[in-house]
């Protein structure tokens, strides 16, 4: 079945469709092009900042968000070598600070917070951020559908980490007023269960020969069979468009008791599994039908941004994927196990999801830095607070947050050894400015840093460049109702062969005056995730190809894929994409997760040896380096921990830990 544009609703007006490429409505054309050589003669430090204009409200924008148009062009021209060729003389803003932070994500905001702890409340801090909002990956999406206000997370989704939060990170969370242990009182996911909604698998005809929505007989990570009665297995066996051998092989994976590596002890088996991909393990050792690999292909994507072709069998075992029963492996990690695959009960229990994800953490951090910009006084009211963006960069603030500003150069004056200050150059609205500071923290992506500073030794630059970012797309689709999902009894759909491998009705979470809807006839956010992979290539090459793919894909392609995938997967429940989709926000993250080391691709991780992130994060002169990249760990606690370390490296003041 194929759909016409009209059936898909491509001609429908969706909320603020005009901003489909994610332009902030108040950002002028000059800001979007950010060409540094333009308008130099008329530029002055007094140019009105976009964030100070009336109605400036980035979370309310739909269309292409995440790395939106206007945020990355300057950095890409720096990368391509064209920036300085075309640049006019920088304008000296005359501003001096105790600290300039490059990057307004959770690590940059935490850096400012820790610096104030060390240097005092009156210390003067400037944060430069190239996007139109603060928070980095911790991005908030808002939309109003038929009178209902809906929130969504555009990136960083929750307080969670495979390993326990450090005392420092826990202290920050606690001091911001977040009571992680209260999560159960906010969360009503039992609603889906009470309505009989389940995890589903969508088999697509291009991969499996037929479009079919089937109840998943096992839980998301395969840890347990979710169906002791056998009803779902029966449905799976009769409905899934798989060969009889493939169906039998899926079932066999859960009951496998054959020792495929006789003669090896548990440690030796883990060492072997660390060197083979899960896909190869299934095909060569367990000898499953290739359709089984196609079915399981996308399982690790939400953690690794990679499919089972590029994730080790040992990690698959750690994640709870099936096929290892007969090996009788001892509990605990083996050599080179991925950090995501190591289970920890304490870490698992420390979980909190705000309706806008960890954007609420970013907003609470900003409240602590610039109180006038974020009214309110609790971690509950933060969810509905309207940010006063025009207060973020006022001269009287001890911390100023300057958005739409791409740092392009960081250098010591006169040189690293003799410097008393650092000069930071940045572009805003096509103008090139300089500010000076006693210290600088680079809380931006590590791969960007070699383009900002030529003062860093070559080996450290190589280490910084190796922090390959993982490309990801988090899409929020605002639906007028979810009756079709109820009819099909689907709360989430895993679609291993489709453009978006995951689609889930958003968590039912209420915080403060934000009360989530509970009736299927009311609007809801459906989150759809895409991980652009190139199976068969090494991990870093897959990420590079995926990044290219995301930058080249227009909003219209995402929209068409969303509409068509939903029409095909939930159309049988009377879903009509033209009628039921009210708004689409595509959060495109070509520079997504920090790259985490992987035993298949990073020999030093498996064999032991220096980790590039340790070399990469070394301070030089008056500059320290933060960001989640600094520990190769894509989690919020890491962003906080690395900010703490970076500030500690710059100051002699003793910072409190827990
Ligand atoms: C889609 C997605 C989902 C995630 N989900 C979770 C989750 O559920 N839980 C979790 O703990 N972690 C999650 N993460 C990981 C997330 O990266 C970290 O939790 C954390 O938010 C990282 O913060 P950061 O400040 O280190 O980096 P970032 O958030 O990336 O912030 C760095 C900032 O620096 C800016 N910057 C870069 N170059 C420049 C420049 N030259 N000038 C000015 N600014 C610059 C960037 O634009 C960015 O805004 C997720 C990440 C993604 C992409």
Image (cartoon, helix red, strand yellow):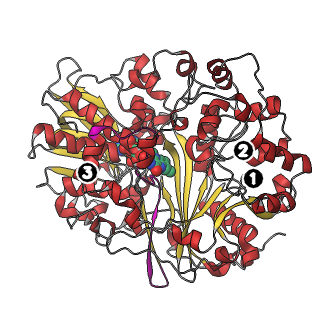
The residue carrying pointer 2 sits among few (fewer than 14), some (14 to 19) or many (20 or more) residues within 10 Å by Cα, namely: many
Q: Nearer the viewer, residue 329 or 594?
A: 329
Rendered-image quadrant of the C terminus: top left
How many other residues sit within 10 Å of disc 3, few (<14), some (14-19) or many (≥20)?
A: some
Q: Is residue 161 magenta?
A: yes
Q: Position of residue 264 (x, y in %)?
A: 71, 17
Range covered by the magenta-colored residues: 145-168
**Residue at the spot of label 2:** 297
Q: CA distance from mark 3 to mark 2?
A: 39 Å
Q: CA distance from mark 2 to mark 1?
A: 8 Å
Q: Are marks 2 and 1 in contact (CB under 8 Å)?
A: yes
Identity of the residue drawn at 56% across and 76% down: 14
In the image, 21 versus 333, the foreground residue is 333
Magenta residue check for 21: no
Q: Quadrant of residue 179?
A: bottom left
Q: Is residue 517 left or right of residue 117?
A: right
* Image mark count: 3
Q: Nearer the viewer, residue 321 or 431?
A: 321
For the point 56% across and 53% down, which residue is it?
473
- The residue labelled by disc 1 is 497
**Earlier along the polypeptide chain: callout 1 or callout 3?**
3
The residue singled out by tag 3 in the image is: 174
Q: Position of residue 11 (x, y in %)?
A: 66, 77
């Amino acid at each position: 079945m194929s759909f016409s544009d009209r059936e898909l609703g491509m001609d429908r007006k969706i909320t603020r469709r005009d901003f489909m490429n994610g332009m902030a409505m108040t950002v002028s054309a000059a800001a979007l092009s950010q060409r540094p050589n333009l308008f130099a003669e008329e530029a002055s430090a007094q140019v009105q900042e976009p964030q100070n204009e009336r109605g400036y409200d980035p979370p309310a924008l739909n269309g292409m968000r995440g790395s939106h148009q206007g945020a990355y062009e300057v950095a890409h021209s720096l990368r391509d070598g064209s920036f300085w060729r075309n640049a006019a003389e920088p304008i000296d803003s005359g501003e001096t600070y105790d600290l300039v932070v490059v990057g307004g994500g959770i690590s940059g905001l935490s850096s400012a917070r820790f610096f104030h702890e060390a240097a005092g409340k009156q210390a003067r801090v400037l944060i430069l951020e190239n996007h139109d909002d603060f928070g980095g990956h911790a991005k908030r999406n808002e939309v109003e559908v038929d009178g209902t206000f809906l929130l969504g997370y555009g990136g960083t989704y929750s307080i969670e980490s495979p390993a326990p939060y450090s005392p420092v990170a826990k202290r920050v969370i606690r001091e911001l007023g977040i009571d992680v242990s209260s999560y159960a009182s906010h969360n009503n996911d039992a609603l889906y269960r009470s309505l009989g909604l389940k995890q589903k698998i969508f088999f697509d005809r291009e991969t499996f020969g037929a479009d079919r929505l089937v109840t998943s007989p096992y839980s998301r990570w395969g840890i347990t069979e979710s169906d002791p009665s056998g009803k779902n297995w029966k449905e799976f066996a009769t409905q899934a468009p798989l060969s009889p051998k493939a169906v039998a092989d899926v079932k066999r994976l859960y009951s496998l008791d054959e020792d495929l590596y006789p003669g090896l002890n548990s440690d030796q088996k883990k060492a072997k599994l660390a060197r083979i991909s899960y896909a190869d393990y299934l095909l060569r050792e367990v000898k499953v039908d290739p359709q089984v690999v196609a079915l399981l292909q996308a399982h690790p994507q939400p953690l690794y941004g990679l499919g089972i072709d590029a994730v080790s069998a040992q990690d698959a075992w750690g994640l709870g994927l099936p096929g290892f029963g007969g090996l009788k492996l001892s509990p605990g990690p083996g050599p080179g196990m991925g950090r995501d695959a190591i289970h920890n009960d304490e870490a698992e229990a420390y979980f909190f999801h705000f309706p806008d994800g960890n954007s609420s953490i970013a907003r609470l951090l900003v409240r602590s830095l610039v109180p006038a910009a974020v009214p309110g006084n609790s971690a509950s009211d933060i969810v509905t607070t309207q940010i006063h963006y025009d207060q973020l960069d006022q001269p009287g603030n001890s911390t100023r947050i300057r958005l739409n500003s791409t740092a392009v150069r960081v250098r010591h004056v006169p040189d690293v050894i003799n410097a008393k200050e650092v000069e930071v150059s940045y572009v805003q609205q096509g103008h090139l400015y300089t500010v000076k500071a006693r210290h600088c923290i680079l809380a931006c992506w590590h791969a960007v840093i070699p383009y900002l500073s030529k003062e860093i030794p070559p080996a450290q630059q190589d280490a910084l460049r190796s922090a390959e970012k993982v490309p990801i797309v988090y899409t929020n689709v605002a639906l007028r109702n979810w009756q079709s999902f109820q009819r099909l009894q689907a709360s989430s759909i895993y679609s291993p062969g489709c453009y978006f491998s995951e689609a889930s009705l958003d968590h039912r979470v209420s915080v403060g005056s934000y009360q989530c809807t509970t009736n299927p006839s009311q609007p809801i956010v459906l989150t759809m995730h895409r991980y652009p992979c190139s199976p068969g290539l090494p991990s870093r090459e897959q990420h590079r190809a995926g990044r290219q793919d995301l930058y080249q894909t227009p909003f219209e392609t995402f929209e068409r894929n969303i509409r068509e995938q939903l029409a095909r997967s939930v159309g049988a429940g009377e879903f009509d994409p033209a009628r039921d989709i009210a708004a689409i926000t595509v959060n495109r993250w070509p520079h997504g997760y920090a790259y985490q080391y992987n035993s298949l691709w990073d020999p030093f991780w498996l064999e032991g040896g220096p980790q590039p992130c340790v070399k990469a994060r070394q301070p030089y002169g008056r500059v320290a380096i933060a960001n989640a990249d600094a520990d190769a760990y894509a989690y919020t606690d890491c962003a906080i921990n690395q900010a703490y370390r970076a500030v500690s490296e710059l100051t002699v003041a003793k910072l409190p830990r827990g």
